[in-house]
Image: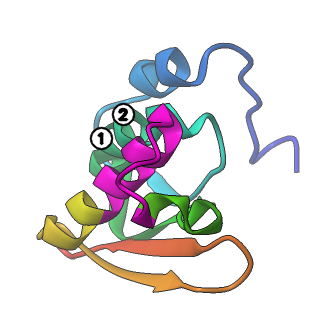
Amino acid sequence: MGDRVEIRLGPALDTLRALPAEPTIDLAYLDADKASYPAYYAELVPRLRPGGVLAIDNVLMSGRILDPADDDAGARAVAGLNDSILADDRVDSVLLGMADGLTLVRRRDV
């Protein structure tokens, strides 16, 4: 697979921002520091090809996203991202309630 896969090491946000801005990604999987999920989403969605999919793991955080008293930055960021995805007219999405939650985001044709 070496001719088709490129491994880049470094801070994720810097790596994403260094990618070409045009849509070139068919599939991305997000499982990183939860407080940065909104920033990763903002960088990834424009880079998805139409029909491309972003899988976002741990979107339920053991139910912590539903507790407004939970002041964990990660839980608040993921809760906000979940709301943002629903309002994002660039994508279709489904949240699967398996394990700790997995959201599949598909970029609409542009």
Residue 14 or residue 37, whichever sits in front: 37
Crowding at mark 1 (Cα within 10 Å: few <14, some 14-19, many 20+) = few
Residue at 27% over, 48% down: 46
What residue span does the magenta drawing correspond to? Answer: 66-82
Crowding at mark 2 (Cα within 10 Å: few <14, some 14-19, many 20+) = some
The mark tally for this picture is 2
Residue at 61% over, 60% down: 61
Marks 1 & 2, CB-CB < 8 Å contact: yes
Corner quadrant of residue 21:
top left
Is residue 86 rendered magenta in the image? no
Residue at 22% over, 72% down: 86
Residue 17 on image: x %, y %: 40, 22
Residue 66 on image: x %, y %: 42, 66
Report, in whole angstroms, how far the alpha carbon at label 1 lies from the one at label 2: 5 Å
**Amino acid of disc 2:** Ala
Residue 3 or residue 44, whichever sits in front: 44
Give the numbered dot on residue 42.
Answer: 1
Is residue 70 rendered magenta in the image? yes
Horizontal arrangement in the rendering, residue 63 relative to residue 52 (left or right):
right
**Amino acid of disc 1:** Ala
- Which residue is labeled 2 in the image? 39
Quadrant where the image shows the C terminus? bottom left
